[in-house]
Amino acid sequence: MKHYIGYGLALAALALALGAWLRAHDAYKDADSQAKLLSVYLKQKQAEIDAAGEREKKALSDLEAERKKPATVQTVTKLLPMPLPGTVEVQKVNDVPTLTVTGDPQANLNAIQNMEVDCQECKVSLQARETQYSAAIDQLKAAEKDRDNWKAAAKAHSGFWKGLKNDAIKIGIGAAAGYALSKR
């Protein structure tokens, strides 16, 4: 009869050890699968950052091509008031006050066009930086989540021995109580 109690305790201890190992193993597998998913997510975010950079390069090259074209009245929008090589005056044409720019008309048009292109370049660069910034923030959050998953897996793995010890103490107390009650 004594051997049956020892075999039962050994079997219970083995079952506890197996359960603790399975918990640690599952935590590691969960962290590993999360890491794989986050890796795919980080690659997507990096592709998003790269695409924003490419869009910016294309838009800037288009704007530079626009800057190299000769400025005409049709290609220049009204961005007044702004500093021009000439002066802006109010003159009456057919009794209607009109703004006229004195000086070299081509230099004025070129100045307006260059200012407009500079403004558009800044807008394009700002939009690209905002996209890259948001993607970088998402990457940082994903990396922090990955770190937290691996921390949890490490705690679960190191918790194997602690869990086994706690489970063994519980079984020992339960077995001692059962043995004491069976002797009555």
Image: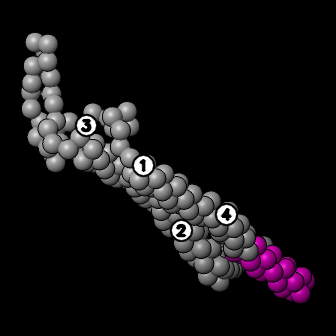
Badge 1 marks a residue whose secondary structure is: loop
**Range shown magenta:** 1-24
Q: Measuring 16% from the left and 36% from the top, which residue is drawn there?
A: 101
Label 2 is placed on what type of residue? Ala
Badge 4 marks a residue whose secondary structure is: helix
Relative placement, left or right, of 114 versus 99 is: right
Give the Cα separation between the discs numbered 1 and 3. 18 Å
- N-terminal of the pair, mark 2 or mark 3, is 3
Q: In the rendering, which numbered label is found on residue 40?
A: 4
Q: In the rendering, which numbered label is found on residue 69?
A: 1
Give the Cα separation between the discs numbered 2 and 3. 45 Å
| Nearer the camera: disc 1 or disc 3 | 1
- N-terminal of the pair, mark 4 or mark 3, is 4
x, y percentage for residue 181? 73, 71
Label 3 is placed on what type of residue? Leu
Residue that badge 2 annotates: 143
Residue at the far top: name it. 95
Main SS, magenta residues = helix
Badge 3 marks a residue whose secondary structure is: loop
| Nearer the camera: disc 2 or disc 3 | 3
| Nearer the camera: disc 4 or disc 1 | 1
How is the rendered protein coloured? one colour
